[in-house]
Image (cartoon, rainbow, N blue to C red):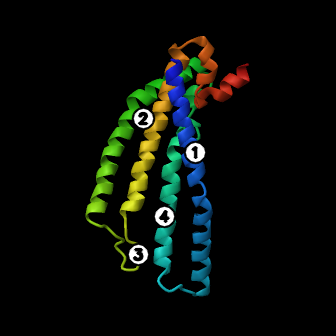
Amino acid sequence: MKSMLDVSDRIDRVLDRVADTIGWLFILTTIVIAFDVVTRKIGYQMPGMGSTKLQELEWHLHTALFSFWLGAAYIHNSHVRIDIAYINAKPRTIVFAEFIGCLFFAIPYCLLALYFSADFTWEAWVDNEASPSSNGLPFRWIPKGCLTAGLLLLFAGVISVLMRSIVYLYGDPDLQGRATPAVIAGKVEASS
């Protein structure tokens, strides 16, 4: 069980490092959006970089940000979740629900989404897909590839949470504190 927890810790470190690194794109995205808004308002158009290209670049960058943060968001329980069923539940019950959710919902979803997004990316690469706009950006496979990579990171995050849940539920009580998934981290601290 300790080795399972070590693997989960390594996955978490990689996901955090990817999210921290890709987070710098937020600054670039903000600059591109601000530049696009200002230049459209004053009527200036940079040669070779019109508003259409800038707007497409905005959503390409946003796709990268969103996609590469998926795995880290999942391991830190920062994703959207409806916790009505968890309000009065014990930590062990919550972790068991997380375990079931990972095993029967999140893993199959990730595998199916990865299959289709990889095909989606491959077709864009093979067809050399570009923007439908004549003023748009080429290389549509890049944002589509970001989505595929993001789903792969989400899958890694789900595996990490699943391993933590297994160690928390069935492992040595000495490892339970280290294995506590983010989904119950606040409840465990509050009950201590």
Q: Is residue 105 left or right of residue 34?
A: left
Q: Residue at x 53, y 42 (%)?
A: 15
Q: Which mark is residue 106?
A: 2
Task: Please tell me which of labels 4 and 1 falls first in the chain.
Answer: 1
Q: In the image, residue 36 lies at what x, y percent?
A: 57, 76
Image height of 100 relative to 145, above or below: above
Identity of the amino acid at label 4? Trp
Q: Is residue 184 left or right of residue 164?
A: right
Task: Please tell me which of labels 4 and 2 falls first in the chain.
Answer: 4
Identity of the amino acid at label 2? Ala
Identity of the amino acid at label 1? Arg
**One can see residue 78 in this view:** yes
Q: CA distance from mark 4 to mark 1?
A: 23 Å
Q: Nearer the viewer, mark 1 or mark 3?
A: 1
Instruction: Confirm or deny contact between disc 2 and disc 1 (CB under 8 A).
Output: no
Q: CA distance from mark 3 to mark 2?
A: 35 Å
- The residue indicated by pointer 4 is 59
- The residue indicated by pointer 3 is 136
- The residue indicated by pointer 1 is 17
Q: Secondary structure at mark 2?
A: helix
Q: Residue at x 46, y 37 (%)?
A: 156
Q: In the image, residue 136 lies at what x, y percent?
A: 41, 75
